[in-house]
């Protein structure tokens, strides 16, 4: 492993010279980086509070630390690495660095993180300060990539910290019917509502999912556009069936099972049966029946169609061709629809704006379009399942 350490350092040392520096703020549990010092400071202050709430909701009596591989402690003298929160004030820069157009957060383990070249240059400077905690974090920490605009990013941060919690706990997202990844996304999404970072889960989660089920939707074929909402509704029901968020998490996390005294070498379906006396198929039937009995309002049906048409995702890919006024109008239309105050005319207008997207092909716009091509192909493969 020592050889790996020096290989990683060699990569850092020869990284491309870059743009303006990134500002580092160290908190008790995290290392927050941003080009904007004020943004790094404000997000750093919020991160500890949100992390306390997220971890307290899922594992209130368990401290999720990231440990070092055996034999590595003597290299740095640090008990555990911290994780990085990389915060962007520019949504285009976030999308360009991550390749996740249309997303508003990304969490990745070391070795799977799209670290931009100029940040590697800054990591070299940070490394040379000699702080062992920072050095071991560069090698072993996970990375949260987060755009943060004027309205703040508490909900998105809470969402991503659930993924980070799963990494720290070594969770395994496997479930019957291939629903493990859907449940994983659902835990992150449900946390936003459970901790009041987003409101009205009935309108934004239950009703759109109910609308999909009433139209013949099946859990074995969850549409990409509804994966977070379907996942959140599954997690909400799962927590009720097993009695607590921690027990629900134990279905997927061996360390949490061990902590709660359940068999470590078991499956989510077996543990669900042992805890709740319910098969996985029985659980899905209860979830489905409850939602089929739910009354869907016109606002909920409109939100379902807004989701299924991927309006926000399409707006992200078409953004270079949209004038600033059109972008703002699209955002306002989306906010109104998701608040339950939209009309059919609002959805028609949003479609019209996207359909009319056009701009003079300047070098900057052409670069922005080219940057989107491979992410668009990758996303198309993901959505189609190919």
Image (cartoon, rainbow, N blue to C red):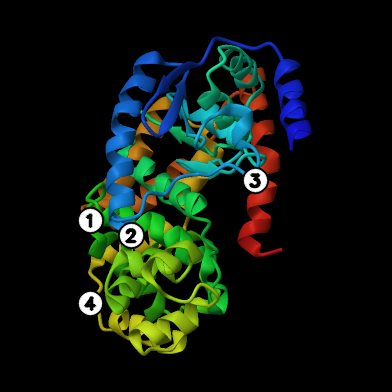
Return the disc, 4 or 2, that comes first in the chain's sequence: 4
In 3D space, how far apart are the residues under numbered discs 1 and 3 (Cα atoms)? 30 Å
In 3D space, how far apart are the residues under numbered discs 2 and 1 (Cα atoms)? 8 Å
Return the disc, 1 or 3, that comes first in the chain's sequence: 1
Image point 71% across, 30% down: which residue? Answer: 5
In 3D space, how far apart are the residues under numbered discs 3 and 4 (Cα atoms)? 36 Å
Return the disc, 2 or 1, that comes first in the chain's sequence: 2
Q: Nearer the viewer, residue 349 or 80?
A: 80
How many residues crowd around disc 1 within 10 Å: few (fewer than 14), some, or many (20 or more)? Answer: some
Q: Are marks 2 and 1 in contact (CB under 8 Å)?
A: yes
Residue 339 point in image, percent of width and height: 23, 51
User: Is 279 left or right of 372, judged from the image as shown?
Assistant: left
Residue 340 is tagged as 1
Image point 59% across, 15% down: which residue? Answer: 122
Residue 81 is tagged as none
Q: Are marks 4 and 1 in contact (CB under 8 Å)?
A: no
Circle 1 SS class: loop
Q: Are marks 4 and 2 in contact (CB under 8 Å)?
A: no
User: Is 142 left or right of 329, judged from the image as shown?
Assistant: right
Residue 303 is tagged as 2
Return the disc, 3 or 2, that comes first in the chain's sequence: 2
Which residue in the structure is indicated by mark 3?
376
Residue 8 point in image, percent of width and height: 72, 28
Q: Nearer the viewer, residue 307 or 77?
A: 77
How many residues crowd around disc 3 within 10 Å: few (fewer than 14), some, or many (20 or more)? Answer: some
Q: Is residue 47 above or below residue 132?
A: below
Q: Nearer the viewer, residue 98 or 330?
A: 98
In the rendered image, is residue 162 in sight? yes
Query: Which quadrant holds the N terminus?
Result: top right
Residue 340 point in image, percent of width and height: 22, 56
Which residue in the structure is indicated by mark 4?
295
């Amino acid at each position: 492993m020592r050889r790996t350490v020096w290989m990683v350092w060699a990569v850092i040392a020869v990284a491309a010279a870059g743009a303006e520096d990134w500002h580092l703020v160290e908190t008790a549990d995290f290392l927050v980086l941003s080009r904007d010092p004020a943004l790094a400071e404000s997000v750093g202050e919020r991160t500890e509070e949100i992390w306390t709430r997220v971890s307290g909701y899922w594992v209130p009596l368990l401290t999720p630390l990231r440990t070092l591989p055996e034999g590595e402690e003597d290299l740095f003298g640090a008990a555990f690495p911290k994780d990085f929160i990389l915060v962007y004030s520019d949504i285009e820069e976030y999308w360009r660095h991550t390749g996740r157009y249309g997303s508003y957060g990304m969490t990745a383990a070391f070795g799977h993180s799209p670290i931009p070249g100029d940040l590697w240059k800054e990591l070299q400077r940070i490394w040379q300060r000699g702080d062992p905690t920072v050095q071991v974090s560069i090698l072993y920490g996970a990375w949260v990539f987060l755009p943060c605009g004027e309205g703040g990013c508490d909900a998105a941060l809470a969402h991503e910290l659930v993924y980070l919690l799963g990494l720290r706990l070594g969770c395994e997202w496997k479930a019957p019917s291939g629903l493990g990844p859907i449940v994983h996304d659902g835990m992150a999404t449900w946390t936003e509502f459970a901790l009041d970072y987003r409101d009205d889960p009935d309108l934004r989660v239950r009703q759109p999912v109910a609308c999909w089920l009433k139209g013949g939707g099946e859990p074995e074929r969850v549409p990409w556009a509804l994966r977070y909402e379907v996942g959140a509704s599954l997690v909400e029901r799962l927590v009720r069936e097993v009695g607590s968020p921690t027990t629900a998490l134990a279905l997927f996390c061996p360390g949490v099972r061990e902590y709660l005294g359940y068999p470590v070498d078991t499956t989510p379906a077996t543990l669900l049966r042992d805890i709740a006396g319910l098969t996985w198929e029985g659980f899905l039937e209860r979830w489905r029946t409850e939602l089929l009995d739910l009354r869907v309002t016109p606002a909920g049906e409109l939100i379902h169609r807004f989701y299924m048409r991927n309006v926000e995702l399409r707006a992200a890919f078409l953004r270079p061709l949209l004038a600033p006024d059109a972008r703002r109008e699209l955002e306002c239309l989306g906010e109104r629809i998701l608040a339950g105050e939209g009309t059919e005319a609002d959805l028609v207008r949003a479609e019209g704006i996207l359909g009319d997207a056009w701009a003079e092909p300047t070098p900057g716009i052409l670069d922005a379009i080219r940057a989107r091509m491979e992410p668009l192909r990758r996303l198309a493969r993901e959505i189609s399942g190919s």
